[in-house]
Image (cartoon, rainbow, N blue to C red):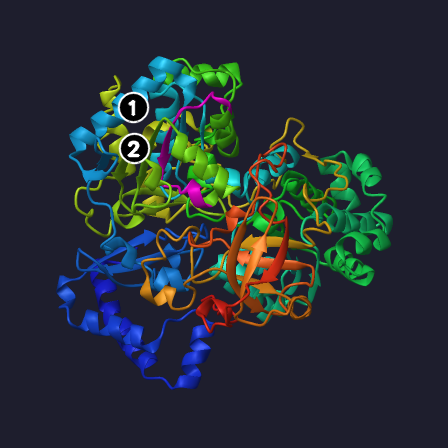
Amino acid sequence: MSSNNERKEGVAGFMQRAKEQANRNVEHFAEGMAAGSMPEGKLFDIAQQISDKRLGELTVDSTTCGYCAVGCRFDVYTDGEEVLATRAADPEESPVNDISTCVKGKFSYNFANSEERLTDPLVRDENGEWREATWDEALSRVVEGFQDIIDEYGNEAMSVIASSKATNEENYLMGKFARQVLGTNTVDNCNRLCHSSTVAGLAKTYGYGAASISVKDFEEADLIFLTGSNTTEAHPVLGTRVKQHVKEGGDLIVFDPRETQIAEYADQYTSIRPGYDTVWVNGVTRYIIENDLYDEEFVAERTEGFEEVKEAVEEFTLDYVEEVTGAPPEEIVSAAEAIAEADRTVFGWTLGITEHSHGTDNVAALANLAAITGNVGKPGTGVSPFRGQNNVQGGGGDMGPLPDNFPGYQKVADDEVRAKFEEAWDCEIPAERGYYTTEMFNAFDDGPLEGMFCIGENPSLSEPGKKHADEVLEEMEFLVVQDLFMNETAKYADVVLPAVSFLEKEGTFANTDRRVQKVNQVLEKKGNAKADWEILQELANRMGRAWDYADTNEINEEMRSLTPIYGGISHERIEEKGGIQWPCWDEDHPGTERLYTEEFNTESGKANLVPVGYAEPMAPQTEEFPLTLTTGRVLYQYHTGTMTHPEEGIMKYNDRDFVEINPGTAASYGIENGDPVRLESDKGEIVVTAQVTERIGEDTVFAPIHFAETAVNTLTDSERLDPEAKTPEFKATAVRISPVEGQQSTDRPGSVEPARGDD
């Protein structure tokens, strides 16, 4: 581990590099921006701020990034009040990112000291207006509101939305609070909106709903096969690894509706229509089976269900695949043969595969393809769903703030498991699962739910069908929001509790390759804000429990005593090793770098190949709505903007949503680059700026998800859900587009080709 003095000495080097970067010529600066750097003036300002401080007064601590789930580690230079700079930690301490960080990891920390931060609780007065309150008053109001609902409607009338931004320890307590204190299994998190179909699809095929690989497998692979992933913008440091793989001679194949930057590095990019992924995946699988290109030994010894899959894919001929998806037959063939010829292939995907009404089937189809080609359990092989929020793997899944799972994916319906938690938590727990997040908002319509405790999430923007979500939030009998800012959801709340960011707390996160890493406090808490676990403990005790955790280490000790896959992952061991990948059964276990090396986590120990048939969007294109809208992220923003909207530098590059339109489509509607256009679905309409680009196909449009002003989820539907995972169909919404009459073309940041930097 690097000493504090060594890190301080590194500040001088950082200053020099920053000043040199600030003085480079404009041409090189533009090149730097493509790599995710900030403007030269920003770099100079940072260097100047540091130079104004005596080095001996700076504090240098390492922590884990709170943006996406790549899990980058870096050193943070502070004066105790604000972040002055960051740089990648020692490579031995940062195995995921090595020496790299993305633009947000480098620069996006102004949110921590934003004047808009919540620093005191807020309650509504008798006129419905907000006023600041003491913690005592605010917590009393929360307890009274929760208890009133429980007394009148029963425990199952309460719901909890947990936070994938929070630590593992805090998410463990969120699940415990829901079941022990509120007496309900209706607790869920943002995983429902993104990768719950990954969890469902992989759980039923391989056993664990998580990546099977370690990040080093990207280096050892012969071929990386990516689909539904805008890697360089959504997971920039992983994008850097993929590009390095290509630079060193590895192959890359990309299937996606958009020709994102990562596709520019591919040996083969195939454009596909959104919403028909089982068709082209099954087409690749069929060709491999039909031409005896599959791994016969692996299939025979380590899988079951092959004959059923063989029969299921029979209809997906090359011509049929082209007719449905637009993928040319020769490209299906070349992809299949490339997988067969490679000794080692890693399959990666994100929300372009999962956020569909058939996302679970999409994932199962990819799992089938990886298994029949023998690309599981060996170095340089495996499946890698890139997770979105920083702790959606740990907090969103591993820790069990889920309606059907306890921590460690232990089933609520299992009598023996449930009895274990009832004894440990001294409470009775219903055997029936609660509502998933997407079901919660429909359940409020029908009456079973009346109250909600929303922690670190913003469903007003993130839920499908924004109009419906807002109606539910407004009519809810009692709503408590716990967050950093007064976000769109908090505006409907009865009480708002100020929480702290990842920079102001201790604990652990689990990243996209199951690596549990330490989070260290690098800034003082703002005002009277409290950590999520502290707030939960105070509420639990006011509601009749006796929680007495002194710190997150004590929470971790309790959690891992009940969670076998985390059994050996103590704070002390994480500090020693720099991170441990689960499952880690005890303190003598080294952790698991790669899953399924000997057997799958199934009853038979073999992969359960699942036959998957034809699937299409629930609301495909029609004459009235002839285009398909797909949504996603951009490099210079993050989710609903809680942490990026206060960033001046970031906002200069993307300060509003836009819509990408193919030049041919734009011409047919009389739309020019920068024009305001109206997007309409059967659920609503929004006005955004047109960005005319060949990145998108002629019958598809793309819009980001980051801004309340346009709120793209106005167009999506809360009832079009995956039947197993209940994931919304964010990636395929039938829409129509039209120019907005009487408004001129604009020259806006959102109306130019977005920057594609990633390191």
Horizontally, is 159 left or right of 702 in the view?
left
Q: Which residues are magenta?
A: 446-461
Position of 147 relative to 138 (above/below): above
Residue type (three-letter) at the residue carrying disc 2: Asp
In the image, what residue occupies the spot 22% across and 28% down? 139
Which element carries disc 2, helix, strand or loop? Answer: loop
Position of 159 relative to 368 (above/below): above
Asked whether the residues under the numbered discs 2 and 1 touch, taking CB atoms below 8 Å apart as contact, a structural biologist would say yes
Residue 290, how many percent across, how many down? 86, 48
Point out the tag, 2 or 1, that comes first from the N-terminus. 1
Q: Which mark is residue 279?
A: none
Residue 391, how many percent across, how many down? 42, 44
**For mark 2, what is the residue?**
494
Horizontally, is 277 left or right of 261 in the view?
right
**For mark 1, what is the residue?**
145
The answer to whether residue 462 shows anywhere in this view is yes
Horizontally, is 163 left or right of 1 in the view?
right
> Local crowd at mark 2 within 10 Å, few (<14), some, or many (≥20)?
many
Residue 625 drawn in magenta: no
Residue 453 drawn in magenta: yes
